[in-house]
Amino acid sequence: MVVVWSDIAASLRLAVAAIVLSSSTAVAQSVLDYSECDALLSSPPFDDLLTDDGGGSGELNSDRLGAAFLGVACSRDQFVRYFADAGWEFLGESFNQGESGPPSARFMTDYSIAFCKPRSRPWRWIFYRCREMAGVAFYEGRVTHVNAGLNL
């Protein structure tokens, strides 16, 4: 009988610990302010950068105009809406955590999303489906890297 009570006590301690940890994570995520991200995405040059007249997705890279997003709290839905409005498709997401990037520009990531600007119909059957591709990496809800460009 003693073993059963100790098992129950251990289970209760684990449950309480899980609740405390999950609630602290939810509180930490809820304090992120996404308004700066909305302001960036809806203002020049980002407002029409990804359209055909906009100047090209390559300018969205972290070492170019995309540097404005580094450290900014953004949500997945904000970027999905931004790319979809410019005719891009959402490709998927990844939850890999760790350090990434070339040795000269390492960044932390725990979540990333990818997008595709599809080629016109006849060309997508001959070549790779996406004319351009883009990816956004996040760490703890903030953008850590943006990469975009032509897909030959």
Image (tube, helix red, strand yellow):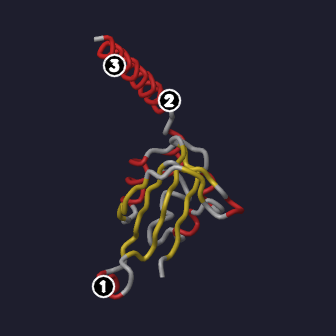
Specify which label sits upstream in the sequence, 3 or 2.
3
Q: In this view, does 84 lie to the left or right of 112?
A: left
- The label shown at residue 147 is none
| For the residues bearing labels 3 and 2, Cβ distance under 8 angstroms | no
Using the image as rendered, state which of residue 59 and residue 11 is in the foreground: 11
| Mark nearer the viewer, 1 or 3 | 3
Separation (CA) of disc 2 from disc 1: 45 Å
**SS at mark 3 in the image:** helix
Q: Of discs 3 and 2, which sits in the foreground? A: 3
Q: What residue type is labelled 1?
A: Trp
- Counting from the top left corner in percent of width and height, residue 75 is at 44, 44
Amino acid type at mark 3: Asp
Per the image, the residue denoted by label 2 is: 28
Of pointers 2 and 1, the one earlier in the residue sequence: 2
On the image, numbered disc 1 is attached to which residue?
125
Amino acid type indicated by mark 2: Ala
Which disc is residue 7 wearing? 3
Check disc 1: other Cα within 10 Å, few if <14, some if 14-19, many if 20+.
few
